[in-house]
Amino acid sequence: MIKEILCIYIIDEKSNPIFIRENYFQGSGNANHALLSDFVTALQAFAREFGEEETRVIELSDAKILTSMDKLSHNLFAIKCESDAKNKKMFGILNQIKNLFIDKFIGHLASSEEMKKEIMRSFEAELNEIISEPADSLSKFLKSF
């Protein structure tokens, strides 16, 4: 996983985290995902109350959270990343994740649990490609020979 990314969240319109991927490393703490998803969702609602379309960047002391809302499904996509990560790079990755999720799940939300699990496995496999370090991708490519 790209080292600047600490966590990826997909949160439904009721503030429930429907997908979480953490980048574990030594010394990192476990986040309370429900609390974080409620916090980010509350900030989105607060922004709308003041006429803003959405909150895009939430800066914390040692990290930041970048968000993007899907207007159709009202799912919120978020990346928690290191504070020095480049916003343009992180938003590019976030939009790729959002588009991948929408492509995989739109039209399948009423599918059986088994079908949803299969779609999620496919989503996670393609997500791994999006968030892998460029050196990891090159290494995988070279090993294929």
Image (cartoon, rainbow, N blue to C red):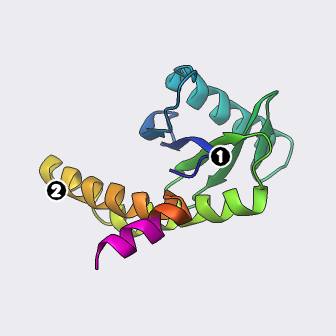
Residue 95 x, y percent position in the rendering? 60, 64
* Residue 138 on the magenta span: yes
Q: Is residue 140 above or below residue 15?
A: below
Residue at 52% over, 20% down: 30
Query: In this rendering, which labeled residue sits more in front, label 1 or label 2?
Result: 1
Residue at 28% over, 80% down: 145
Task: Give the camera-side residue of 85 and 42.
Answer: 85
Residue at 65% over, 54% down: 68
Q: Is residue 131 visible?
A: yes
**SS under mark 2:** helix
The reply to whether the C-beta atoms of the residues labelled 1 and 2 are less than 8 Å apart is no
Residue at 68% over, 56% down: 90
Q: Is residue 90 left or right of residue 24?
A: right
Q: Residues within 10 Å of mark 2 (few under 14, many from 20)?
A: few
Task: Give the camera-side residue of 144 and 10.
Answer: 144
Count all numbered tags in the image, as a single digit.
2
| Amino acid at circle 2 | Met
Residue 65 x, y percent position in the rendering? 70, 41
Q: Is residue 44 above or below residue 123?
A: above
**Disc 2 marks which residue?**
115
Task: Give the camera-side residue of 142 and 38.
Answer: 142
Q: Is residue 83 above or below residue 131?
A: above
Specify which label sits upstream in the sequence, 1 or 2.
1
| Amino acid at circle 1 | Glu
Q: Is residue 59 left or right of residue 134?
A: right
Residue 135 x, y percent position in the rendering? 52, 63
Q: Which secondary structure type mostly characterizes the magenta part of the structure?
A: helix
Q: Is residue 37 left or right of residue 66?
A: left
**Disc 1 marks which residue?**
4
Q: Which range is magenta?
A: 137-145
Residue 10 x, y percent position in the rendering? 49, 45
**SS under mark 1:** loop
